[in-house]
Image (cartoon, rainbow, N blue to C red):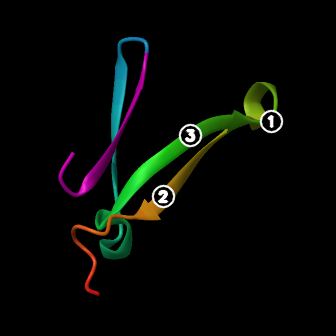
């Protein structure tokens, strides 16, 4: 959403500010890695051709 990545789990929502290079990308996938308290959210970005210079 705009310059931020919105992460929602159940009723909890967090906004994560993105660096400028990622603001011009689209999220292509997301997954959880690890177990228990060591679980990480991995978000994969790809350049959005509509907003990248050619």
Secondary structure of the residue carrying numbered label 2: strand
Residue 4, image x and y in percent? 27, 51
Q: Is residue 8 left or right of residue 33?
A: left
Q: Which disc, if any, is residue 45?
A: 2
Secondary structure of the residue carrying numbered label 1: loop
Q: Main secondary structure of the magenta part?
A: strand
Snapshot quadrant of residue 53 = bottom left
The C terminus appears in which quarter of the rendering? bottom left
42 in the magenta segment: no
The residue range painted magenta reads: 1-9
Secondary structure of the residue carrying numbered label 3: strand
The mark total stands at 3
The answer to whether 43 is drawn above or below residue 54 in the figure is: above
Q: Which disc, if any, is residue 34?
A: 1
Residue sitting at the far top: 10
Residue 42, image x and y in percent? 62, 46
* Residue carrying label 3: 30
């Amino acid at each position: 959403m705009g310059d931020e990545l919105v992460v929602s789990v159940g009723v909890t929502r967090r906004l994560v500010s993105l660096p400028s290079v990622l603001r011009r990308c689209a999220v292509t996938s997301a997954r959880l890695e690890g177990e228990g308290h060591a679980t990480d959210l991995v978000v994969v970005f790809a350049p959005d051709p509509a907003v990248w210079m050619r």
